[in-house]
Image (tube, helix red, strand yellow):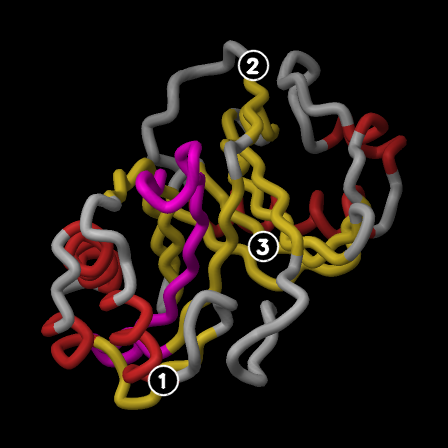
Amino acid sequence: MSAKQIVVSATERLFNQKDLAVVDEVFGPVYVQHSALGPDGVEGLKGLVSRLPKASGYELVRVIADGDLVVTEGVFTGFAPVPLTGYDVWRVVDGRVVEHWDALGAGATHAASGAGASTETGDSAANKALVTEWAEKILVGGDHAAASAYVANDSGIDVDGLAVSYVAIHAAIAEGDLVYTRAEGELDGPVIVNDVWRVHGGKIVEHWGLVAPVPKEFPHGNGAF
């Protein structure tokens, strides 16, 4: 199976079926955990899954795969009074999931132009390069005057109105017209900034985003990034 197929199957078995057997089948033997929800290693993952509420569920909304990294966007129910949007990044090496990062929040923001429907086709490398340059130069570097070179005029993306300050881009994962970036930021404290950008005609035309606070404590020493 491809890295994408492994992760899609694993999330279904973990979050909906609560199937601990999948951990032995495709995780580890070294499993580096960056989530604050569970300890490091495969045993920590088993403990996390065993504590999931029986009535909880997960709906996969989007998956983007790029080399050994796969990001899943999904909706978790049964964990809180409202559904939670989750962005999970998984590293897959030689058919095994060996590292994981996440962020959870009450909902994702969305801005879009009318430029073409998402087809998940396109030049992944070119789109990744465009979004990475945009993120480094505009979002982190603060060169807002140059934003129009990267973003369609009717996209609804307003860099001058951003509440969060981007500090560093830690990951860019691209497939077709979609590029996911995971960033470190500041918004009344340190935050994890999750963005999905859709590129059409050489410009960013659509954006989904979720900002989540960096947890104050972790059951491991790996940190959020």
Report the residue marked by disc 2: 113
Question: x, y percentage for residue 213?
Answer: 66, 53
Report the residue marked by disc 1: 41
* Amino acid type, mark 3: Arg
Q: Is residue 89 left or right of residue 98?
A: right
* Amino acid type, mark 1: Gly
Report the residue marked by disc 3: 182
Q: Is residue 177 left or right of residue 155?
A: left
Q: Please tell me whether residue 167 is drawn above or below residue 76 in the rendered image.
A: below
Q: Which of the 4 image quadrants contains residue 51? A: bottom left
The mark closer to the camera, 2 or 3, is 3
Q: Residues within 10 Å of mark 3 (few under 14, many from 20)?
A: many
Question: x, y percentage for residue 30?
Answer: 34, 89
Q: Earlier in the sequence, mark 1 or mark 2?
A: 1
Secondary structure of the residue carrying tag 3 is: strand
The answer to whether the residues at label 3 and label 1 have Cβ atoms under 8 Å apart is no
Question: x, y percentage for residue 151?
Answer: 68, 27
* Amino acid type, mark 2: Ser
Secondary structure of the residue carrying tag 2 is: loop
- The quarter of the picture where the C terminus appears is bottom right
The mark closer to the camera, 3 or 1, is 1
Q: Main secondary structure of the magenta part?
A: strand
The answer for how far apart the CA atoms under marks 2 and 3 are is 23 Å
Secondary structure of the residue carrying tag 1 is: helix
Q: Nearer the viewer, residue 162 or 207?
A: 162
